[in-house]
Image (cartoon, grey):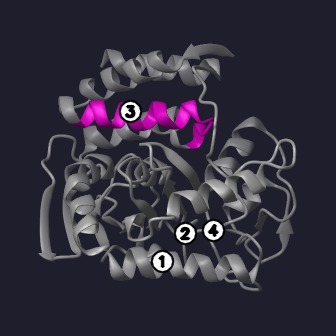
């Protein structure tokens, strides 16, 4: 296990993406997203995805040299055609436009279409919070979740994220979570390590609870909280595939497959200007104080200490470095 500086992860990621056909701007933005995830201990959305990004750049499953097309068909609706490129540069291209719209009318929606998977949704909502906005994000993924009591995959892990500004250019609260008991990557990592998984994470192909990651990958993940999480997953599906105009989960191909048609996903963001309430900041601060009365308790995302170094499995780091030499 190697201890690697976050700055090294940024440089290796950027160099690898450039070597596989990404433009300078795209490689820089994606390196920031990867290192952002690693600094928060989210390996599933960090270096774990780098090889896939590079493979798909070569096969054309993701376009690394396109320019997102931003439009504003209505005063509170901003749409971005990602041109089958990465979601992060598409979001960056529209950030100023959507925040300006929210400041003008109070609330705005940002729809990113024809995009690659967004991996860490919190990367997007945190940027909205740092711009002074409340940000809510929704996206879907390839089908891996059956309804409670069923065995037919209908929706993906379908994450959602919520971020709140602190009024000082920072983040008062932020969470980013799948609507399943665990992210799919945790299952694949357990399989690769030869580990079992806790009961309640998944069911097998017959709908029976399992602790075998291989059986889980052949079955379905469980919604967090049973029917409650299932309802949230359906909500995310409707926001991303319906309102934002993306591909339904049941038609999304495996996200990390090297070749094939582009992901063609849509990502939905609701952006709210909290300035409509002069006492908003005081309310959020008071809530954080109330939560922090118990030792070790805090509002999600608040006062989070970011990692400057992370332990990376030797094989993963060696593979990541090898990608820079194409």
Looking at the picture, does residue 169 appear above or below residue 111?
above
Q: Is residue 71 rendered magenta in the image?
A: no
The numbered disc on residue 177 is none
> In this view of the protein, which residue sits in the foreground, 77 or 18?
77
The numbered disc on residue 156 is 2
In this figure, which residue is indicated by the disc labeled 1? 237
Please tell me which of labels 1 and 4 falls first in the chain.
4
The numbered disc on residue 179 is 4
Contact check, label 4 and label 2, Cβ < 8 Å:
no
Q: CA distance from mark 3 to mark 2?
A: 25 Å
Mark nearest the camera among 3 and 2 is 3
* Residue 31 x/y as whole percent: 37, 31
Please tell me which of labels 4 and 2 falls first in the chain.
2
* Residue 299 x/y as whole percent: 69, 52
Circle 3 crowding by C-alpha within 10 Å: few under 14, some 14–19, many from 20? many
Q: Which residues are magenta?
A: 26-44
Q: CA distance from mark 1 to mark 4?
A: 11 Å
The numbered disc on residue 32 is 3
> In this view of the protein, which residue sits in the foreground, 211 or 173?
173
Please tell me which of labels 3 and 4 falls first in the chain.
3
What residue is at 58 percent from the left and 65 percent from the top? 157
Contact check, label 3 and label 1, Cβ < 8 Å:
no
Mark nearest the camera among 3 and 1 is 3
Left or right, residue 222 beside residue 76:
right
């Amino acid at each position: 296990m190697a201890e690697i500086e976050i700055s090294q992860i940024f440089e290796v990621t950027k160099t690898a993406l450039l070597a596989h056909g990404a433009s300078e701007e795209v490689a820089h933005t994606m390196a920031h997203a990867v290192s952002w995830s690693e600094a928060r201990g989210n390996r599933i959305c960090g270096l774990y995805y780098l090889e896939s990004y590079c493979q798909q750049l070569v096969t054309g499953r993701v376009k690394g040299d396109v320019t997102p097309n931003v439009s504003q068909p209505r005063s509170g609706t901003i749409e971005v055609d990602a041109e089958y490129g990465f979601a992060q540069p598409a979001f960056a291209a529209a950030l100023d436009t959507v925040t300006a719209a929210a400041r003008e009318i109070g609330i705005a929606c940002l729809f990113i279409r024809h995009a690659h998977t967004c991996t860490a949704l919190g990367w997007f909502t945190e940027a909205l919070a740092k711009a002074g906005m409340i940000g809510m994000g929704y996206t879907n993924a390839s089908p891996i979740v059956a309804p409670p009591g069923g065995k037919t995959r209908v929706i993906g892990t379908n994450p959602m994220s919520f971020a709140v500004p602190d009024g000082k250019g920072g983040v008062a609260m932020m969470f980013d979570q799948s609507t399943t008991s665990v992210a799919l990557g945790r299952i694949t990592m357990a399989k690769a390590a030869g580990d079992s998984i806790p009961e309640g994470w998944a069911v097998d192909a017959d709908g029976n609870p399992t602790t075998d990651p291989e059986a889980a990958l052949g079955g379905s993940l469980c919604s967090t909280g049973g029917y409650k999480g299932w309802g949230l997953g359906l909500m995310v599906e409707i926001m991303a595939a319906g309102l934002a105009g993306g591909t339904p989960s049941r038609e999304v191909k495996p996200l990390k497959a090297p070749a094939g048609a582009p992901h063609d996903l849509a990502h939905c963001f609701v952006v709210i200007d909290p300035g409509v309430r002069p006492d908003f900041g005081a309310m959020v601060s008071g809530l954080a104080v109330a939560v922090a009365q118990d030792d070790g308790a805090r509002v999600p995302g608040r006062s989070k200490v970011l990692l400057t170094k992370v332990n990376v499995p030797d094989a993963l780091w060696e593979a990541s470095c090898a990608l820079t030499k194409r």
